[in-house]
Amino acid sequence: MQLRYNFRLYPTPGQCAALARAFGCARTVFNDGLRARQQAHAAGLPHLSDGELSQRVITEAKKTPERAWLGEVSAVVLQQALADLNTAYRNFFASLSGKRKGPSIAPPRFRSRKDNRQAIRFTRNARFSITAGGKLRLPKIGDVTVTWSRRLPSEPSSVTVVKDAAGRYFASFVVDVAAEPLPQTAAEVGIDLGLTHFAVLSDGRKIDNPRFLRRTERRLRKAQQALSRTAKGSNNSKKATVTLACAHARVADARRDFAHKLSTRIIRENQAVVVEDLCVKGLARTRLATSVHDAGWSAFVNMLEYKAARYGRTLVKIDRWFPSSKLCSACGALAGSMPLNVRSWACPCGASHDRDVNAAQNILAAGRAERLNACGGTVRPAA
C-alpha cells in the first residue's frame, strides 16, 4: 500500500523565492490548460488530448516572450500541474457518466495566487534526492533543510512541496509500505462517536472530547479582530493574516495528533474495530456544525481504515440508520422514541443502560453479524 510521510522544511530566503516562482509557474500552466479546453469547448471543437495540451501550454508557450519564464523551473513541475488538470477532468467526466461513485464532482476551476495552500510535485523523472547530509535536493531550487521525525520505509516515488496558510513548508513523500501484521488478539471493540465524549467503546471506556477549537476560541477571536482592524492589502494585514493562520494551524495539528494516537492505540489493542458510517457532511449542516467539524470524525475513521489494512486488523462500517441507541444490548428489544437528552434508560427486561455504552455494544454486535467468520457463532456480547 502507498502512504504519505510528511516532514517540515526550512528553506532559505533564496529557496523561498525559487519555490514561489515554481508555485506561480505551475499555477499558470494549470490555468492556461483549463482556459484552452474551455475555449475549445465553447467553439465546438473536439476535446484537446493530453499530449496536444502539453505541446500548446508548455512547449510552445516557452518560446513566446509572455511565457518565457516558464523555463526557469523544472519541467516536471509543469507536467505534473497539467496532469492534475487531466485527472480533474477525468473525475468530472466519470462523475457525469455515473462511473464514479459518491457525490457529484464539479468541473475544474482556475487556481488563484491568493489560495491559502500552494503545492508543486516532483516525480522520479525530476531526479530529486536526499543528500548524505539529510537534505532534500530539488531541481532548480537547491538543498532544502528537512526535519526528519522518522525514517522513510522505502524509496519515495514522488515528493510534494506544500506551503500552507501559516507560511510553513512541508515535504510530502509517497512511499510503498509493506503490510506489517500485528500479533493476533481476541479483543474486538465497537465505537460510538459523539460530541459529549469523542468516542465511547463497547467495553465501557469513554474518551473525552478534547474540543481543540472551542478551547482556543478566545485566542482565535482576538486574532480575527486584530485582522479586521487593519487596512486591506497593507503589510499589517498580511502579518495579521499569518498570525490568524498560525493559530488555526496549531488547532489542526493538535487535532491530528490526538486522532493519530487514539487510532493507533485502538488498532493495536483490537483485532476487529466496528464503527458507524456517519454522514458528517449532513451533520455539518445542522446547528452543531462547529462542534462536528471540531471533532474530526472523518479523519479519525480514515486513520482507522488505513491502519487496519496496514497492521492486519479488520475494520467494519455498519449502516448509519442502525438503531444502536434504542436497541437493548441484553435482549434485543427496541425502545420507543428517545430524545437526545435521555442519556440512560431501563429496558423492560430489567437491564439498565448507559445510552452511549449500549450503542457501542450494539455497534459491535452488528459488526460481528456482518463479518463472515461470525456465521454460526455468538454475535451479541454477554450482558
Image (spheres, grey):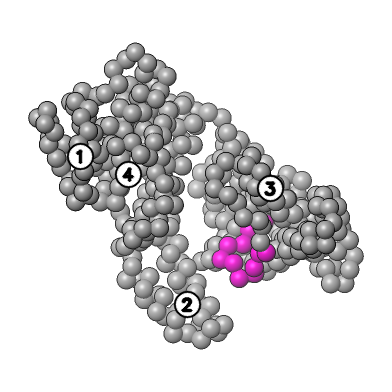
Q: Which residue is mark 1?
A: 336
Residue 58 in sight here:
no
* C-alpha gap between disc 1 and disc 4: 22 Å
Position of the C terminus by quadrant? top left
CA gap between label 2 and label 1 equals: 53 Å
Residue 310 versus residue 229 in the image, above or below:
above
- Find out whether residue 243 is within the magenta segment: no
Residue 13 quadrant: bottom right
Give how far across and how far down residue 94 sits, in percent.
66, 44
Residue underneath mark 3: 93
Magenta stretch: give its range. Answer: 110-120
Callout 4 amino acid = Leu
Return the residue nearer the eye: 62 or 74: 62
- Judge depth for marks 4 and 3 and give the one in front: 3
Which amino acid, mark 2? Ala
Q: Earlier in the sequence, mark 2 or mark 4?
A: 4
Residue 240: numbered disc: 2
Sequence-first tag of 3 and 2: 3
Q: Earlier in the sequence, mark 4 or mark 3?
A: 3
Residue nearest the viewer, comparing 225 with 235: 225
- Specify whether 88 is left or right of 196: right
Q: Earlier in the sequence, mark 1 or mark 3?
A: 3
Q: List x then y, in percent, for residue 361.
A: 26, 32
